[in-house]
Amino acid sequence: MAEAVWRSELEGWRLDWFRLEATGDGRAAAALVARRRRVAAALRDRWRPADLAEDPFVAAIRRLFRAAGCDPTRHRPSSEALLRRVLKGEELAPIHPLVDLNNALSVELMAPACVLRAGSFDFPVTLRSGRVGETLDSMRGPYGLAGKPLLADGAGPFGTPITDSHRVKVLSETAAAWLVVYRPAELVAPAEAGATLDDLLAEAPVARRVG
């Protein structure tokens, strides 16, 4: 099994990598929906969408985006986009157990998280700023990468904390994936992401951690 080997050209970031295998447990998927709704209700009691940027963690992620050359108000971190939807009362539609788990973790950590199909990229990977002329065949269509924080392997960029590429997309038949969480190193406890993921999987075992 490949190890998550990465390096960063950008200061201040922490990446947490988790290897996952889907369990195919339908009851676990229902438990994940119930937990996500409970967390969403608690967040709506605490925040309004217009006030979200006041959270120190959200503000720290925005600073990292700006340092990379990206305006986070024009190109929102994926976690902030999810949080805004949740705070507006939107239900996150189920997509795939691994994607749904990723979104739940992202909301709970208030940090961008992306799930990447196993075998669709190779380690080592580099976290860096996008270069002029680089583009991504993203879930949103062709996406200019200049100044965006991104992950790249030997074949080029494949993901960002904003959106990911079709190259690494989880497919209906996908049973194994890597999940990566992007966090500001200055504010996090190293074990927090793993502990939150373990807690999620204990309540809603839609996947198991491998390794």
Image (spheres, rainbow, N blue to C red):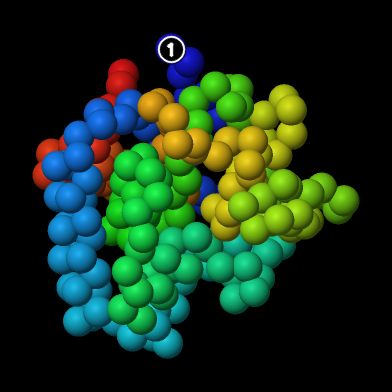
* Residue 15, x across and y down, in percent: 46, 41
Q: Give me the residue at 74% from left, 34% from top.
A: 156
Q: Is residue 127 visible?
A: no
| Secondary structure of residue under mark 1 | loop
Please indicate whether residue 6 sits to the left or right of residue 147 in the image.
left
Establish if 51 lies above or below 24.
below
Q: Looking at the image, which residue sits at the far right?
A: 133
Q: Which quadrant would the N terminus be assigned to in this image?
A: top left
User: 32 or 57: nearer the eye?
Assistant: 32
Please indicate whether residue 178 sits to the left or right of residue 27 in the image.
right
Q: Give me the residue at 35% from left, 54% from top.
A: 94
* Residue 116, x across and y down, in percent: 50, 36
Q: Callout 1 environment at 10 Å: few (<14), some (14 to 19), or many (20+)?
A: few
Q: Give me the residue at 63% from left, 42% from top.
A: 166
* Residue 152, x across and y down, in percent: 67, 36
Q: Which quadrant would the C terminus be assigned to in this image?
A: top left
> How many numbered marks are there?
1
Amino acid type assigned to the residue bearing label 1 in the image:
Met
Res 49 → quadrant: bottom left
Please indicate whether residue 135 sits to the left or right of residue 195 in the image.
right
Res 204 → quadrant: top left
Q: Which residue is mark 1?
A: 1
* Residue 125, x across and y down, in percent: 61, 30
User: 95 or 155: nearer the eye?
Assistant: 95
Q: Looking at the image, which residue sits at the far top?
A: 1
Establish if 168 lies above or below 105.
above
